[in-house]
Amino acid sequence: MSGQYIPYGCQWIDEEDIQAVAEVLRSDLITQGPMIQRFEEALAEFCGATYAVAVSSGTAALHLACLAAGVGPGYEVVTSPNTFVASANCALYCGAVPRFVDIDPLTYNLSPGRMEEFLAKTSGPDIPRAVIPVHFAGQPCQMEQIWSTARSHSLIVIEDACHALGARWQDSNGTWQRVGSCSHSDMAVLSFHPVKHITTGEGGAVLLNNESLYRDLL
């Protein structure tokens, strides 16, 4: 073997980033300070959402989004099997049951058709409460179809956008929608782990437009 390997992560941190961190460390508030609010506002504006709530990780963002959605014992959460384990574990954290729906072989994302089939034949003690479509490797899910199906079954839609900050998709009207705008979801979550598009060392966020859900997250 050559001894060479592909690094798990290769973050880009420049002098401006280092100075920004130093500025916070020299301030009176190194947690929950004004820089957090500035970051949340900039993130919401970039993604086209009304609100952004910064948290400690993408996993925490998924967990909190499920709690805000009312996920708990007696409920199921539908998600993709092609994802990081947190997309399913967030249901378990709330006492709910994760249910995997197969992916589309062309997009590697949750298949809207398979989701419809699953929900149509669902029976048992647990009730589907939410669906977490995962925008895998930056490829946006078919959100119009997922949103329509979810609404017909009274499901909350939580986008796992941890792979897709900055991605866009075109709706049936020809309008470009940015992932995280929540135009066809109730909430979207991001991760700022070192292997993601931008990093805060660790970190995450929940994006949303609904004020009531926003208050629940706080």
Image (tube, rainbow, N blue to C red):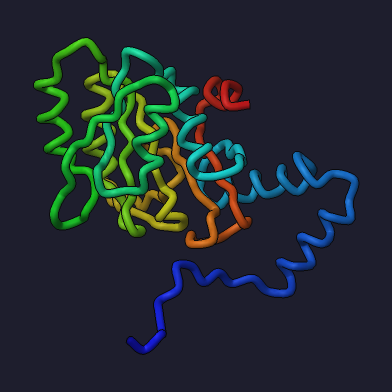
Q: Quadrant of residue 22?
A: bottom right
Number of marks present in the image shown: 0
Q: Is 199 drawn above or below residue 30 in the view shown? A: below
* Placement of 131 over or under 58, stated as above or below: above
Could you tell whether 28 is left or right of 84 in the image?
A: right
Residue at image point 29% right, 22% down: 76
Front residue of 2/120: it is 2
Q: Quadrant of residue 3?
A: bottom left
Residue depicted at x 17% and y 13%: 124
Quarter containing the N terminus: bottom left
Measured as percent of width and height from the top left, residue 24 is found at 82, 54
User: In the figure, is residue 36 to the left or right of 112?
Assistant: right
Rendering coords of residue 6 (x, y %): 40, 76
Res 104 visible: yes
Residue at the spot 14% in from the left edge and 15% down from the top edge? 123
Return the x and y of residue 218 as percentages of the image width and height. Answer: 63, 26
Question: Depth check: 6 or 196 in front?
Answer: 6
